[in-house]
Image (cartoon, helix red, strand yellow):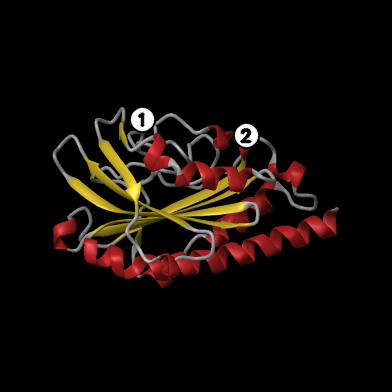
């Protein structure tokens, strides 16, 4: 999800005011993913999406257990325009999300940073529509104000496109919070078949620049594996 990184929380374009215990929820609040992936239950689809997220071992970061919006369709994905969800959110079938941070977070000047990964399964054609909406954010919603009191700006990221996975789009986001804290980072959207993976990395600038390409490549590999599992199940169950 595109959510705001509040001082004690993770990021994407929705606010994280509601707190929570970080437990994973099935995507049962919207269309039944199991109905459109023959041979797979919602539990199995959710496992595939969960597996596409990063593992803590590879990140060398701590899981942000207090963040509520881990999985499920009640939380938005594309909500950059003052928290209002994009129409493509109606095309989602399932989603999984998790956040990690290092010990120095939330102090970017001291090397603090956090990483979030959101994996979304869309109806056929929905992934392309979501990517188009995401790429257009700097034009449709260059700045936003959220109910939490945070404000944000979004722009095209100044990164080498060759460093990104095929078809990926990167945005730079900058946040200001009610207490005066500011932070910035990158959001990279990676499409693979009917899946889109969103990488959120924010905080210490040098770390953000040094890790985004590596993490985006890992996310693409994970999405490739997830897409193969979904296709195999659909073929077997169809």
Q: Which residue is painted at 39% across and 32% down in the image? A: 81
Q: Nearer the viewer, residue 85 or 131?
A: 131
Q: Nearer the viewer, residue 230 or 60?
A: 230
Q: To which residue does mark 1 refer?
A: 82
Asked if one can make out residue 143 in the rendered structure from this viewpoint, the answer is yes
Image quadrant assignment for residue 211: bottom left
Q: To which residue does mark 2 refer?
A: 30
Q: Is residue 56 above or below residue 189?
A: below
> Residue 28, how many percent across, how many down?
62, 37
Q: Nearer the viewer, residue 162 or 207?
A: 162
Label 1 element class: loop
Q: Nearer the viewer, residue 37 or 82?
A: 82
Crowdedness near tag 1: few (<14), some (14–19) or many (≥20) residues, C-alpha within 10 Å: some
Q: Which residue is painted at 67% across and 45% down in the image? A: 125
Instruction: Using residue 17 as the reference point, say whether residue 53 is left or right of it.
Output: right
* Mark 1 or mark 2, whichever is nearer to me: 1
Q: Which residue is painted at 44% across and 53% down in the image? A: 98
Instruction: Using residue 232 as the reference point, say whether residue 148 is left or right of it.
Output: left
> Residue 100, how many percent across, how many down?
36, 58
Q: Is residue 69 above or below residue 98?
A: above
């Amino acid at each position: 999800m595109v959510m705001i990184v509040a001082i004690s929380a993770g990021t994407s374009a929705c606010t994280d005011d509601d707190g929570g215990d970080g437990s994973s929820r099935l995507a049962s609040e919207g269309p039944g993913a199991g109905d459109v992936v023959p041979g797979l239950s919602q539990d199995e689809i959710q496992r595939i999406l969960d597996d596409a997220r990063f593992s803590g071992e590879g990140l060398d970061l701590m899981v942000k257990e207090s963040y509520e919006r881990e999985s499920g369709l009640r939380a938005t994905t594309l909500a950059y325009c003052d928290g209002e969800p994009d129409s493509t959110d109606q095309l989602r079938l399932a989603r999984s999300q998790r956040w990690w941070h290092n010990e120095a977070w939330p102090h970017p000047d001291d090397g603090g940073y956090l990483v979030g990964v959101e994996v979304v399964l869309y109806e056929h054609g929905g992934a392309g529509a979501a990517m188009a909406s995401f790429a257009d954010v700097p034009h449709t919603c260059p700045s936003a104000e959220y109910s939490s009191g945070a404000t944000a700006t979004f722009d095209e990221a100044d990164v080498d496109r060759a460093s990104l996975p095929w078809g990926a789009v990167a945005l730079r986001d900058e946040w200001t919070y009610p207490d005066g804290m500011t932070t910035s980072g990158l959001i990279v959207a990676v499409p693979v078949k009917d899946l889109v993976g969103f990488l959120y990395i924010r905080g210490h600038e040098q770390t953000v620049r040094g890790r985004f390409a590596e993490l985006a490549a890992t996310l693409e590999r994970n999405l490739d594996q997830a897409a193969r599992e979904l296709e195999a199940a659909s073929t077997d169950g169809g």
